[in-house]
Structures are given as structure tokens and as C-alpha cells.
Image: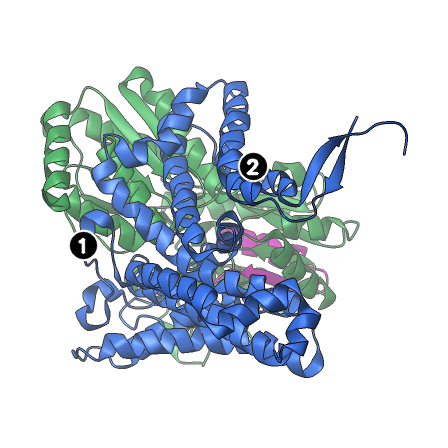
Amino acid sequence: MKRRTLLASAAMGLMLASGAFAQGMDKVKACFVYVGPIGDGGWTYQHHQGALAVQEAYGDKVEIQYQENVPEGADAERVLTQMALGGCNIIFTTSFGYMDPTNAVAAKFPDVKFEHATGFKREYPNVSTYNARFYEGRAVQGHIAGKMTKSNKIGYIGSFPIPEVIMGINSYYLHAKKANPNVELSVVWAFTWFDPAKEADAAKALIDQGVDVIASHTDSTAPLAEAAKTNGAVIGFGQASDMAEYKDGPRVSSIIDNWAPYYVKRVGALLDGTYAQQDAWEGIAGGEVEIGEITDKVPAEVKAEAEALRDSIAAGTYHPFTGPINKQDGSPWLAEGATAPDGDLLGMNFFVEGIVGDIPQ
Amino acid sequence: MFRLEKRPTPSKFWLYATPPVAVILTMIAGGILFAAMGKNPFEVIRTIFWDPIFGEFAFYLRGQLLVKAGPLILIAIGLALGFRAGIWNIGAEGQYIMGAIFGAAVGLAVFPTESRWIFPVMVVAGAFGGWLWAMIPAILKTRFNTNEILVSLMLVYVAETILAKASTGFLKNPEGMGFPGSRNFSSYPAAQNGFLYEPLGLHWGGVAALVTAVLAYILLTRHQAGFQIKLAGQAPRAARFHGVSPARLVVMCMGISGALAGLAGMFEVTGPAGQISIDFNTGYGFTAIIVAFLGRLNPLGIVLAGFLMALTYVGGEMASTNLGLPDAAIQVFQGMLLFFLLAVDVLTNYRFRLAVGAH
């Protein structure tokens, strides 16, 4: 027998065993694929917290399975196939690089739901995508950075020059500039998501340039550890996770990725039969993006301003990308009062006016 | 007490007994580890070693073994030739990356042309990319007497940077909305390394691995170059008297291992991986070093070792997902295999003697 037909019959068996989808399910097996270890203290840790929240919310009605350190590419395809064969009803693939494998496996298992984080391909009706509006958190960080810098030099450790990262840098810079017109931003590209040594080097390079506020788009605590060596001269932010262990040191606030509300909602929809394909992009309002506690190092009035900014974004009364905004080359992007369409943000490949340096191509 | 005594000649028995003994010791020590973690050790060992071949989903997983073993075997055979001659190419991971980039670049350059010649040219380009990357440490060694271990290893990190550059820059998918990664070869038939026989997981990379194993075996047992390689490793001075040029040997061994690693990368990127991406390389080049030694630097042994290693990966994943074992425990288990191999290997060249009196 051909493998394809075998897979199809296996999938059919699973479908029959789990009952009709439209009427909901008695029990859901929810599976998670992680790119790092659950103890990374950042990206994967937060996804796993979301998985645990699903267990907490539904108890006996869900069974959780997960696999750590799954390389992106051929290995991901195998892990996904194993999970689908093993009876998972919904599979969350939690890294951008799983995009093609997710769609490839989804084609073979039409009755298993696939949820891919941070991607844009939904080639089959059983593939949904989800992401969070991290740029909203970057606006709050940018405001704090602009107010807190003494050297007027702020830094940003970029991972890869992709829209997700570029929009964060732009949002950070725009709000720092608004808070402090003299501010200058230096961007260092680490070309990694998680590599403590490289991240520490990037932080060192920024500190050597006189930067005294560092934001990062990489997952480890290394930049904060580097900032901690300056005896309070340099501050930074927690990224992906609260990184609260640096609260007494350089960490003045953080962006926390909170995937729990989304995971609980999606598994719940599968249980009660209301599940449908979608492309989710929630932010501070939906609870996916949280601003970690702003510490006492930040003056009370700056803290109040930052929190007001957060609340206005959450209420929908303010969009972090509101015109007039020009591109780096001076050409207009957003007119006075216009807000950025999602499509512009998702494909963002330019810096805004005022940022020095090029995006590596 | 016991003491170690050097054998007059290496033990033939232990040479072949070492790998199976190491596997058994790994199972025992691993079992104790799993039991200490509150899992049923027999269930875990069965999941790792038995289920992928004979279990419920074996029809799918059996094919995955060759997919995983193919690149390991291909790279390990090249490395083994050098290791036998005392030439230490540690940077196969970098050559693997460069082979993938060269091969993919050729294919993507002519997208979307359909011609039966595209894939063969890509194969040649992949081998060339790996060969080129291996020539850097080879020539530095023969010209300036640098250490090929350090240079080849360092070049892995250079290759990784070029890979990041390729996926975010010169090979980026123009229709990828700015996201990193090249076009996917699965939607470009002329350049795709698809399955030749899916139930066995056989693609051109697997064919290349098995053919290379046979060729390497013939080279080592029947050919002058193979004799020179073995001689250079066992008796460098004698080799020189025999007319073996050390410089030529370095260039040849580094070249072969680089080209094979490049081929492996090329077959992987156009087949199972599907595209150039930032995290395309997953450590095959390093794992192949273990496979080469596990296979006793013998091409046929390497084929068996490659499958065993693939089994611990595929089975390890199953154990991790289905039994809730942390991935770190599986890594420790794989590490144990190398540890016991090296430990038991001592018995090939040494034997235990009951020490009488003080020394």
C-alpha cells in the first residue's frame, strides 16, 4: 500500500474515533512544537506557559503533548507527522521556520487543526496563523528609553532584518524621538534568535558606542547581564519573558509574550465546536502583549506617561504608527493622522526617517 | 588492583565488539537514567530502538531513518578517509552549508526554467561548494602549516553567517513578503530532489550515500590511494619513504570530504529541508564525526552506524513526545553512546591486567 493512502486512512480513523467536529469534542489532544528548550527563559518558555494554561483551563478534557528543540525544516515535518499520526487534534507550531512544514503536513491530515505562529501561509483550510502586535509594547519601551537616556544614545539588538523586527525598531525609535528629540538610535544585527554569546557581544558593542539604554529582539538574558556589569549606567528591557531576575539591576520594564489567552480560546473553540480558520493578530488589548512592571528606577511621572501610552493603545484610541511619518529616505509614508494598514506593517522593509544605518540586504 | 597494559597488536575481537557493547552499555545506563526520572526504562528503550522499525507507525518512520541517515553516512565516509590518514576535518558542517548554498543558488538562478539538466548541474555545484570550502583549510595547511582542525571548525561559523546572509539577502524568496528563506524547491520540479521510493525514504541523497559507501570500501581495500591513506595514518615516516606526498594527501582527503559534505547539503536543501533558511543546518556535519568513529572508520560500518544514529534521533523524538521525556534526557542518552564507545575502545589497544605488587 502507498504511504499516502495509509496516512489518509490513519487520519480517517482518527477522525472517526474523535467524533464529528462540528458538534465539538469531548476531549482534545493539543500538541506543541517548540524551537528551543522550555527552560530558555524567553520565547519557548512563554509558549509552554500557554500550553500549561490550556491544561489548567480544561483539566481532564485536554491532553497536552510537546516536543522541544525541533529544528526547522525536515525534522519539523517528521515531528508534525508523528504527532498527527499519534492522535493530536490540534498542533501549535511555535516558530516562523515551521511555516512550510506545517502546511505540508496539514495537506496530509485535513482533520487535524494546525496553528502556526508568526507566519503568513494558510494554504489549507485546517491551517490558521497567529501572532502578537509586539510593536505596541515597543512604543512603550521607546518612550521610557527616550526619557531615561542621559547620553541621548539608545541601542537595539536586532535578530534578523525581517518585517517583525523592523516594525519593532521603528516603533521604538518613533516613541523615543517623541519623548526626546535629541535621541539617536544604533541598531546592531545579531543574526540569531538565541545565542547568549553573540547577544552579549552585540550589547558590548552598543555600550562601547556610549549607548545607555538597550532594547533587544533576541531571546536570552545576555544583553541584560552585560548591562548589569556597568553598575547601573546602562539599563535595558526584558524580552519575550519578564526577566524579573534583573529587576534589581538593569531591567526597568519588559515585553511579555502571553500566549495563554489565545491557546485557551482556540482549544476551547475546538471543544465546543465553534472552531474556524483564522489569522489572529492581537496586541495589548487582547492580553497577548503585556508590559512587565516598570521599576522604581524610572521616575514616577515617566512611569505614569508610559502606562497612559499603554492604556491608550489598549483602548484603541492611539495607534503607534500614526502619521505624519516619512520613510528613511524622506519619502512620505503616512499622511497626517493616518494610521498604518496591517499590510504595510507585515511587509515592512524600511526604516522610518531619522534612523541611521541600512537594513542589511 | 587492575592496571592497563598495552597490547602488542590491536585486538581484532574488540575492534568489532566495541560498537555493540557500547550500545548495550548505553541502553543499561540510559535505562537507569530514565528510571531515575520516573519513566519505565523498558518502555523508553523500546520506543527508541524498536517502535520506529516495527511499531504502529513504522510504515512512516522506517522511511525517515534513511532520510536522516543518508547525509550522516555521506559526510562520515568522507571524514573517515581523512581521519584514517590523520587529517582532521572538523568543519564538515560548514562544507555542508556551502554545498547547499552553491547547489541551491544554481537552481534558483534559472528559476523557473524546466530542463532535465538543471538538477545534475546543481549536484555538481553542491559538490564544488563543499570542496571549495574544504580547500581553504587544506591549502592553508599545506602552504603555511596551519592547524586544519581549528581552521575548518572556524569556517563553520563563517559559513553560518553566509547562510544567514543568503536567506535574508541574495537567495531570499522574492515572493516571501520580506521574510527570510529562499523559494521552496518542492514547488520547482526541475530542481527538486523528490523521493524515488517513498516507503523507504529513498531520494538521490540516499542513493549517493550507499553508492559512496561501496566506492569508498573499494578505494580503501583495492586502490593505491586507499593504501596510501592507511599507511600515512599508521606510519607517517614509512609513507614518506613510500613516496606519499603529505601535501597531496591533505588536499585529496580534505577535497573528498568537503565535496561529499557539500553533496549532502545539496541533497538536503533540495529535498527534505526544501529551502535555504537561517537554521538550515542542524548539526549533521558534527554528528557525522561520531558516526565515523562509531562505524570504525570503515565505510560499511559507517552505513550501520548512520542508521543506528538515525534511530536514536527518530526514536528519541518519539520517546520525547509520547512519553514526555525532556529533550535534554535524549541528548544525554545520545552522548552516552559516544562516551561508552570511546571507553570500550580502550580495550582494542589495551588490556586489563591484575597488578601484582607495587609499581
Q: Is residue A258 above or below residue B203?
A: above
Colour in which the image shows chain B? blue
Amino acid at the residue labelled 2: Met
Amino acid at the residue labelled 1: Tyr
Is residue A272 magenta-colored?
Answer: no
Residue stretch rendered in magenta on the structure: A138-160
**Which chain identifier belongs to the green chain?**
A
| Quadrant position of the C terminus of chain B in the picture | top right
Q: Give the residue displayed 36% in from the left and 29% down from the top.
A: B47
CA neighbours of label 2 inside 10 A, class few (<14), some (14 to 19), many (20+): some
Say which mark, if any, is on residue B336: 2
Q: Give the residue displayed 31% in from the left and 40% down from the top.
A: A92
Q: Position of residue B285 (x, y in %)?
A: 49, 59
Disc 2, SS: helix
Q: Position of residue A45 (x, y in %)?
A: 49, 37
Model colouring: by chain
Q: Give the residue displayed 16% in from the left and 48% down from the top.
A: A107
Give the residue furthest to the bottom.
B143
Q: Is residue A84 above or below residue B107?
A: above
